[in-house]
Each structure stands twice: as structure tokens, then as C-alpha cells.
Image: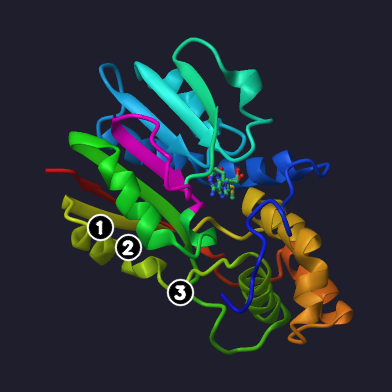
Amino acid sequence: MDGAGAGYGEALFEPWKPGEGERIDLGSMAYDTFTRARLLALGAGPGTRCLDIGAGTGTISRWLAGEAGVDEVLAVDRDVRFLEPLAGGALRTLAADVTEPGFAPGRFDLVHARFVLMHLPEHRRVAARLCELLNPGGRLVLGDAVDLTTAAPPDTPYRLAMRAMWQALRSTIGTDISWTPEYPRLLRDLGLTEIGAEIQVPALTAGSPIGAFWLETWERTREAMLATGLVDAGLLAEAAESITSGSVADLSPGLVTAWGRRP
Ligand SMILES: C[S@@+](CC[C@H](N)C(=O)[O-])C[C@H]1O[C@@H](n2cnc3c(N)ncnc32)[C@H](O)[C@@H]1O
């Protein structure tokens, strides 16, 4: 992880900084429809207990406990400031670090983590631990970023900015998305069955939630992006303008969701 020492929420994306909850919500606006449909298809509903890891602002946890009618939802995050106001009824919250060896919140029919493991250098060990938290027949559903285009030419301002962002995230908090297309194999290696995976890429158009999410993320990562030497302030401004104006004409990074069943 290139010497990264601090984790998510420490060196970057600190939850106490103004606007961080709104930034996470922009990601939720872009992806919740897809995630909800997948979780419903995998049986989330009455009669099930669910664990949402790294629940962020709780949009998925709240939906599971409300509209989806799940019996019990445990929303876990290292920092539960956005989750605590949502607690009540079927929704409980727990402040915990999923990488801690003693992390043992119980057994569940569905364990979900979106945009969490990509930030954890020990993602394999954490995924194995999450499998152990499943009841027999339970489903593990993991989602993370996948980037289909921006590592390759042409070297447009947008692609260079994305490359600088991934490099900056890797060197500051250890984020790594190089392995996420291997999710199906990872879940099979962990002993899960009935494995499936899919990718959703939201349209990167002017005014889109995903466009606003990247603009906010670049703003928060700006110093680390500049430090990569891949971009300068002028190029970052051009990249941002291409998103704001809709002239970008490219694919956004997307969400790869993979799932499997504990035998
Ligand atoms: C990018 S946000 C994703 C939030 C939510 N899952 C979503 O998709 O909207 C990552 C979340 O994971 C949490 N997180 C990061 N590392 C964690 C860890 N080791 N244990 C528990 N939560 C963690 C962060 O605090 C943050 O709320």
C-alpha cells in the first residue's frame, strides 16, 4: 500500500469535516437503486437478520429496516455519527472496526458491505471473517469500485485526474481497486456457493449525482492528487469543468457487486 499509514476517515474523508455526509449521500444517490434490487433478489425481507458493514450515512441500512421489512438490521461503522439518529425499530447501530480480530457482532442471514473493503489492505482476511458471520444458507454481498477505462489512453484531463485520485488514495489510506474484478473468484475461494457478480456504471452527465460525487471527492483529495505529480492545478480545473459541463464523454468508475451463499 505504498507506505499508507492512516485508514479511511483519518487521513482523508474525515466524517467530522463539513459536507462528508453529503458526499457519501451523492454516492448513495448514484447506486442505491442497484444495491436495493440486488439485496431484494437475494432474499432481504421479513424473516431475515442483516448486517451492513461500513454503513456510512445509513441509506441502505434504513431501507432494509424500513421498506424491505427486514426483522433486524445491525449497521456497523467505525464512526456512527450519521447512523445513530436513524436507530430505532428494526435498526441498531454499532461503532466497531471490522478489521479488529475481536469483531464478533453475531450471525446473520445477509451480510453487506459497499465501498468498504477496497479501502482495507487486509480485505481478504476481512472478507473471510464476514463469511464466518453468516448463518448456513446466508448470503454475503460485497460491492466496491471498478474502473473500466481511466487507466488507459487517451490521456484526457478527466482520465489523468482519475488516475491521480486512485494513486493518491492508495498512498494515503491504502485504497486498492486493482483486485475488485476478481471478486467472484475470491468468494469461491472462501467456500461460498451460488456466486454471482454484476457491474453498474452510472451515466456521467452534467448534473448527475455521480459527477457531483467525483467533484466532491477530488476536492477532498486535491492535495494528495497534486502530490502524485500526475496532475497540476490547471489540469484539475479542466477535468472538473469537463464533468460540470458534461463535455467529459467518458465512463465513470462503477460498482462491482459480488455475492455468494454459505453452504
Ligand atoms: C465510502 S463509505 C461507504 C458508505 C456506505 N457503505 C455506502 O456505500 O454508501 C465507507 C464507510 O466505511 C467505513 N469504514 C471504513 N473503514 C472501516 C472499518 N475498518 N471498520 C468499520 N467501518 C469502516 C467508513 O467510516 C465509511 O462510513
Q: Are marks 3 and 1 in contact (CB under 8 Å)?
A: no
**Relative height, residue 174 to residue 22 (above, below):** below
| Residue 176 visible in rendering | yes
* Residue identifier under label 1: 187
The alpha-carbon separation of the residues under discs 3 and 1 comes to: 16 Å
- Quadrant in which the N terminus is drawn: bottom right
- The residue under the point 56% across, 31% down is 58
Q: Is residue 16 left or right of residue 133?
A: right
**Relative height, residue 212 to residue 109 (above, below):** below
The alpha-carbon separation of the residues under discs 3 and 2 comes to: 11 Å
Magenta segment main secondary structure: loop
* Residue identifier under label 2: 183
Q: Which amino acid type is shown beneath numbered disc 2?
A: Tyr
* Residue identifier under label 3: 178
Q: Which amino acid type is shown beneath numbered disc 3?
A: Ser
Within 10 angstroms of label 2, few (less than 14), some, or many (20 or more) residues?
many
